[in-house]
Image (spheres, grey):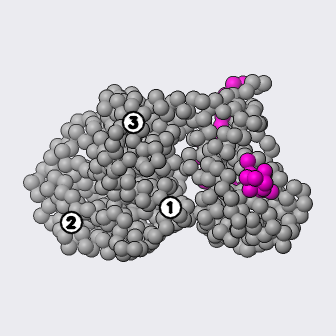
């Protein structure tokens, strides 16, 4: 815990945007007993080696992001203090742009090693391709199907993943080391890596088969006790879980919501700093005696944490932190430019391939009922591909909204169509899911729809995106278990028959119970149709110019 008096706590700088380094070297602490150490942190990089597109590439109306500029800002910050460590809070990879994901995120792992990242927790997206593939990311080796397309070898991460609360059942040990003890400026700094316990609800069950995810706070506290016994004077938790700060909240972040709040409140006083992620929010808080930080996602910010430590007493006497935007008004790092240039030609050639066109904008934004034009289009694509009896014979299609990651913008003006390239389609569906058709009864389908609204916490409701021939009505005012009006469910304008058997197309993420939709696992006779991005590209090619349809499949009454 940050053992500060109120005057010392006031040194905490709560800065969510517009904070830049002066580039000057910091003066050493006044007393030889005091040591200034710097922790540079980030989270949710998601393979954004190139500057993010659209609004994701701006912060406070300033162009931000991209590994070439990220590396430059990081080097400048590091130069201000020789006692520096660089850490991350997970989701370094996964849901990545084409330039990284086309190569199984090998470019991102190489880049993060080159900028001298030292330790990182795992995030839920680190498991997108399975935990065995994550081991390859750490230890190296070419992907068994199409790895090492640019370089003859892949050495793996030069930084160390930490996973204190991820256990491999077969060996009753953590997937990666639980902790690390690292000396910074002569100060022993203990690091603990955690991922949210709810990871099994966010990734395909097959990807984490054989793993157990333990409670975050209890795991961290036990690890902190051990690190103190080993001599750690500062303890930092790297956790891939985050909060949702309230607008205009003060440095205590007393109105923050999200699972992180309960975790932080349960943490041991031995823990000083909590570097967080997952929610992609930018915040710096002083919560229950802990300094809690998070950057905006996609390479847009770096957190600069500065601690003054009394080495004799083993205590932090002051702490400050700022979130530094990764502006693009600095020189591009030449090593990162060379790395991008090695991968970019292949990615650009694939990404430029035309696949169709749109006559209007498709957006992920959900209306009050939970429906979106982009989600509708993806569900319709699933159904179009799977209707043929030879490809599964689907009657309807569903997809999880969280798997639809980007908009398709119409940018050519009224009356004209906007071309869509493969890279645009890939940004929409970057996870590599496979479309599966299975049989479910009408009663099981109704239960699956009800499961969208099962939790008491409305912020956790996940509204599935549905094909155009499925309709239903729901109400938030109804009690859990009856929020969906079952009499309103219609398929091809016919009432749902609870005893009938329906063939339903969905991504294998849902089929395997992802996002907590356990009812989807009750289906039978599954048939794989093909990769979801290929299905969507096929739909674009045969339906272009594609026009967004009215949002009238799901009706909300409350």
Residue lying at the far front in this picture: please name it.
390
Q: Tell me, yes or no, if residue 117 can be seen here.
A: no
Depth check: give the residue in front, 232 or 403.
403
Q: Is residue 43 magenta?
A: no
| Residue at 81% across, 67% down | 501
Residue placed most toward the observer, 480 or 516: 516
Q: Which mark is residue 150?
A: 3
Which span is picked out in magenta? Answer: 385-413
Residue contact at pointers 1 and 3, CB within 8 angstroms? no
Residue at the location (32% across, 75% down)? 222
**How many residues crowd mark 2 within 10 Å: few (<14), some (14–19), many (20+)?**
many
For the residues marked 1 and 3, what is the alpha-carbon distance in whole angstroms?
Answer: 26 Å
Instruction: Give the left or right position of residue 163, taking residue 374 as reference.
Output: left
* Residue 232, numbered circle: 2
Question: Disc 1 designates what residue?
Answer: 207
Q: Nearer the viewer, residue 303 or 533?
A: 533
- State the CA–CA distance, disc 2 to disc 3: 42 Å
Instruction: Give the residue at x 54% y 33%.
Output: 350
């Amino acid at each position: 815990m940050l053992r500060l008096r109120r005057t010392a706590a006031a040194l905490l700088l709560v800065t969510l945007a517009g904070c830049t380094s002066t580039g000057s070297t910091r003066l050493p602490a006044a007393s030889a007993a005091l040591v200034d150490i710097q922790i540079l942190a980030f989270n949710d990089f998601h393979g954004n080696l190139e500057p993010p597109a659209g609004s994701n590439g701006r912060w406070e109306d300033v162009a931000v992001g991209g590994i070439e500029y990220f590396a430059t800002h990081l080097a400048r910050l590091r130069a201000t203090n020789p006692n520096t460590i660089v850490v991350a809070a997970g989701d370094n990879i996964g849901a990545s742009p084409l330039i990284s994901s086309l190569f199984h995120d090998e470019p991102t792992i190489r880049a993060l090693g080159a900028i001298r990242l030292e330790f990182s927790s795992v995030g839920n997206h680190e498991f997108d391709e399975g935990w065995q593939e994550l081991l390859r990311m750490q230890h190296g080796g070419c992907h068994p199907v199409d790895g090492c397309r640019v370089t003859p070898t892949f050495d793996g991460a030069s930084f160390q993943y930490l996973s204190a609360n991820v256990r491999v059942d077969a060996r009753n040990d953590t997937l990666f080391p639980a902790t690390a003890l690292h000396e910074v400026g002569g100060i022993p700094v203990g690091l603990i890596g955690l991922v949210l316990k709810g990871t099994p609800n966010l990734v395909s069950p097959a990807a984490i088969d054989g793993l157990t995810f333990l409670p975050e706070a209890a795991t961290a506290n036990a690890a902190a006790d051990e690190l103190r016994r080993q001599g750690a004077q500062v303890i930092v938790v790297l956790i891939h879980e985050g909060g949702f700060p309230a607008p205009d909240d003060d440095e205590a972040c007393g109105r923050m919501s999200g699972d992180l709040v309960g975790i932080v409140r349960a943490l041991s006083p031995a823990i000083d700093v909590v570097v967080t992620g997952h929610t992609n929010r930018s915040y710096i808080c002083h919560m229950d005696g802990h300094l809690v930080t998070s950057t905006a996602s996609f390479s847009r910010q770096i957190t600069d944490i500065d601690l003054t430590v009394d080495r004799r007493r083993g205590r932090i006497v002051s702490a400050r932190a700022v979130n530094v935007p990764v502006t693009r008004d600095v020189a591009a790092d030449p090593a990162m430019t060379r790395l991008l240039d090695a991968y970019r030609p292949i990615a650009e050639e694939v990404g430029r391939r035309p696949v169709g066109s749109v006559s209007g904008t498709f957006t992920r934004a959900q209306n009050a009922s939970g429906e979106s034009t982009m989600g509708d289009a993806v569900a319709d694509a699933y159904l179009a591909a799977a209707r043929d009896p030879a490809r599964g014979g689907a009657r309807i299609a569903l997809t999880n909204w969280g798997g639809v990651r980007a908009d398709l913008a119409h940018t050519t003006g009224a009356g004209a169509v906007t071309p869509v390239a493969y890279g645009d389609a890939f940004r929409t569906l970057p996870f590599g899911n496979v479309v599966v058709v299975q049989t479910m009864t009408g009663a099981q389908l109704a239960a699956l729809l009800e499961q969208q609204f099962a939790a008491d916490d409305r912020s956790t409701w996940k509204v599935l995106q549905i094909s155009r021939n499925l309709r239903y009505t729901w109400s938030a005012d109804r009690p859990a278990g009856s929020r969906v009006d079952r009499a309103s469910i219609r398929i091809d304008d016919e009432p749902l028959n609870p005893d009938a058997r329906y063939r339903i197309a969905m991504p294998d993420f849902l089929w395997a119970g992802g996002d907590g939709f356990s009812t989807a696992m009750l289906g039978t006779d599954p048939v794989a149709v093909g990769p979801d991005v290929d299905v969507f590209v096929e739909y674009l090619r045969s339906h272009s110019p594609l026009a967004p349809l009215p949002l009238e499949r799901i009706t909300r009454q409350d």
